[in-house]
Amino acid sequence: MHVARGNEAPQYTSIRITEKTIKLKYHMNHKPTGFNSTLVHGTGQKDPLGSVITPIYQTSTFAFKNADHGAACFAGESDGYIYTRIGNPTIRDLEKTIAALEHGFDGIGCSSGMGAVTTVYMAYLGAGKHILSHNAVYGPARGVIEGAFSKFGVESTYVDTTDLEQVEAAIRPNTALIYLETPANPTIGISDIPAICKIAHKHNIPVCVDNTFCSPYLQNPLDLGADIVVHSLTKFLNGHADIVGGIIVTKTEADYKKVRPLMVTMGCNMDPHQAFLTRRGLKTMGIRIDRAQENAVKVAEFLESHPKIDWIVYPGLKSHPQYELGRRLMRGPGAMMSFGLKGGLESGKKLMDSVQLCVLAVSLGGIETLIQHPASMTHSKLSASAKKEGGISDELVRLSIGIEEVADIIADLDQALAQIN
Ligand code: LCS
């Protein structure tokens, strides 16, 4: 497995990442350890009663030692806990662990991925400000700007951010945020994070990257120049399709101080039980992604050579339009792919109705293989022109590969493809 660092020639030689290949940088008081060790042990938060697993602090409020302590907590002079919307030990363990994995200053847990995205929007946008983003982002991440935020005077431009010229040309004097999703949902287009950050920073514009499709295991946007990272924890980080959650990680303390109060006052906070389950799921993220990715490579090769497939986009295939860029930015090709069938939408529907092991459902990044149709599901609320610009065509079918036996996934797709005339 290549590591996109220094002058090393990048290549997807193997798809298993070892601890040696991904060392964490120093993070706050955290002694750097290998990636999988941090997944398991976190950043060293110790439970006072010796619980090996961080317990669920299922409480809305925390008792102060005395009035002065309460006042000191509110004044920020004591790091004691106050109220769960503001902070909670179960949630803090998750926030600090993910911040370490992303090489950021600190994390801000949110109720959902969209909670994280809208909190970032609230922090950097306002009346008369402009956001520049990819025309193939997760549907609601665009929908909320063109709907709710535009009512408050926020302007937006959506371009193909895999094309640097389009990015540069769309910057305006009032551009206040560049928001990238890479690889993008659902086109799997890869944007050049370092090059876009260079352009953005020339104009003093912060860059936020949604790293959901990669996870910090495969890509670290903050190391590539970005200022903020968001994740839908619902996906690879939790990985078990049993919670909805989100997180923001900022590179600097200044950005953390700008964003965290908004999460708190808007009430976009996580719940301790949701944080506990996510922390549990996170422990196995490395081995889950290794396995899902190994499966995905084989599924992609099977689909690419199948006579009923018209086209397929997967970062591990040489046919991916940004294959070389992907090898430079990402430590592996991941487990997400999109494809179109000869026979278009009708064939795609037949495939989705015929799978037996793969589950016809939205979401992604879980242990089970999921298949869905973005144009009528996750991205259905976008206008026809927005879908067209973003390449979210009617025939596009998206697969999130799970950790089942790959022979079973391929056999299921094979029998479903055989149902198509
Ligand atoms: N960012 C990306 C890249 C996503 O794919 C999603 C959800 C979100 C943010 C929002 O996260 P949530 O609020 O759902 O935790 N993507 C979904 C998808 O493709 N199918 O169902 C949800």
Image (cartoon, rainbow, N blue to C red):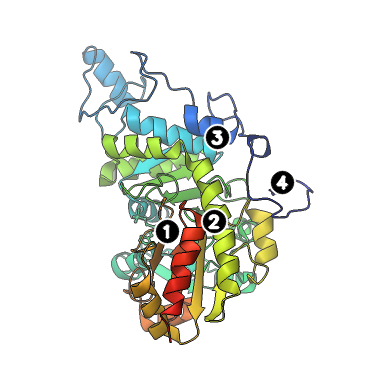
Is the Cβ of the residue at disc 3 closer than 8 Å to that at disc 1?
no
Give the distance between the C-alpha atoms of the residues marked 4 and 2, in whole angstroms.
Answer: 26 Å
Mark 4 vs mark 3: in front? 3
Is the Cβ of the residue at disc 3 closer than 8 Å to that at disc 2?
no
Q: Is mark 4 within 8 Å of ligand 1?
A: no
Residue picked out by circle 1: 369
Residue type at the position of mark 1: Thr
Residue type at the position of mark 2: Asn
Left or right, 196 with respect to 286, comes to right
Where disc 4 sits, the SS reads: loop
Dot 1 or dot 4: first in sequence order is 4
User: Any mark on residue 36, and which?
Assistant: 3
Q: Nearer the viewer, residue 349 or 264?
A: 349
Dot 3 or dot 2: first in sequence order is 3
Where disc 3 sits, the SS reads: helix
Give the distance between the C-alpha atoms of the residues marked 3 and 1, in whole angstroms.
Answer: 23 Å
Residue picked out by circle 2: 295
Give the distance between the C-alpha atoms of the residues marked 1 and 4, in whole angstroms.
Answer: 31 Å
Give the distance between the C-alpha atoms of the residues marked 4 and 3, in whole angstroms.
Answer: 19 Å
Q: Is residue 61 visible?
A: yes
Q: Nearer the viewer, residue 417 or 131?
A: 417
Residue picked out by circle 4: 5
Give the distance between the C-alpha atoms of the residues marked 3 and 2, in whole angstroms.
Answer: 20 Å
Give the distance between the C-alpha atoms of the residues marked 1 and 2, in whole angstroms.
Answer: 10 Å
Mark 3 vs mark 2: in front? 2
